[in-house]
Amino acid sequence: MEVTDHTGELDGQPVFWRSAPSQGAPTLYLHGVPTSSDDWLPFLALTGGLAPDLPGFGRSGKGGQNDYSIDGIAGFVERFLDMVGVERVKLVVHDWGSAALAFAIRHPERIERLVIVNAVPLLEGYRWHWIARRWRQPFIGEMAMGLTFRATMKRVMRPAFAGPVPQDFVRAAWRHFDQGTQRSILRLYRSAPESRLAEAGRGLEQVTAPTLVLWGALDPFIPPAFGDQYAARLPGSQVEHVDDAGHWPWLDKPELIARIASFLGDNR
């Protein structure tokens, strides 16, 4: 399936997204930190759908006026869907893409199916991992960003994979890791103390669409227990733990791409 690149303007900033033809409600894929829609290329080729670069990431605008927060991402999702003329979607979120669950809580009728993959928990009891704790601290976060080089990024990401760190993945992430993205990451994490995460997840029970929670069991950033908690909060959900897979589980286990595609294509 051919994947097409697009560039437009939203909120006075450039926005980049990819699309591929699909039948019925398209799938909306939302990436996390520090990546971009590059994550979703093999998914788009299989299922079709839409995959934007979130504000502050990839090829989208990185202006200081952007709202880098859970509400900011949720608002972006709503305005992006309005811009492309899409009412109802199948939603796939990874890492910070989970901020779009705030959109789903406000508009559960617009979600046909939902897939949550190793996503930032909008749940009680989560504590930020050690990298996030550094980023959340003024000056220390800026120093950490300034000392991040490609080799550093690869070394920090190493525990996130069960096998070798994929070179193409690091190359793609590093390509867009400029000062704008670094600032966006710091503001995003600083906008979200753990109490804010839990607050943003209030009302998850209203999202009744069939849901697949897929969790790499070796994730060093978000323990698999939070996958279980997501499943417990979402009425129409099933949870699958993936052994020998980390934070980006489909990179450790490429067969998960077909698993997700199968779930999205199930019309029951």
Image (spheres, rainbow, N blue to C red):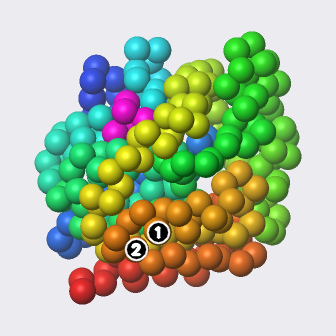
> Is 204 on the left-hand or right-hand side of 118?
left
Rendered location of residue 158, percent (x, y): 82, 54
Task: Please tell me how crowded label 2 is: few (under 14), some (14-19), or many (20+) other residues with Cα within 10 Å.
Answer: many
| Residue under the image location 28 percent in, 20 percent down | 12
Instruction: Specify whether residue 206 is painted magenta.
Output: no
* Most foreground residue, 199 or 82: 199
Q: Quadrant of residue 192?
A: top right
Question: Residue 231, which numbered label?
Answer: 1
Q: Main secondary structure of the magenta part?
A: helix
Instruction: Specify whether residue 72 is painted magenta.
Output: yes
| Residue under the image location 53 percent in, 35 percent down | 195
| Res. 7 in view | no
Question: Residue 163, which numbered label?
Answer: none
Rendered location of residue 213, percent (x, y): 49, 70
| Residue under the image location 51 percent in, 76 percent down | 239
Rendered location of residue 153, percent (x, y): 78, 41
* Most foreground residue, 241 or 53: 241
* Most foreground residue, 26 or 98: 98
* Most foreground residue, 155 or 45: 155
| Residue carrying label 2 | 237
Range covered by the magenta-colored residues? 70-74
Up the image or down, 243 lies above or below 67; here it is below
| Quadrant for the N terminus in the image | bottom left
Amino acid type, callout 2 = Ser
Q: Disc 1, disc 2: CB below 8 Å?
A: yes
Q: Quadrant of residue 222?
A: bottom right
Amino acid type, callout 1 = Ala
| Res. 101 in view | yes
Tell me which label, 1 or 2, sits earlier in the chain: 1
User: Which structural element holds mark 1?
Assistant: helix
Rendered location of residue 264, percent (x, y): 35, 75
| Residue under the image location 21 percent in, 50 percent down | 107
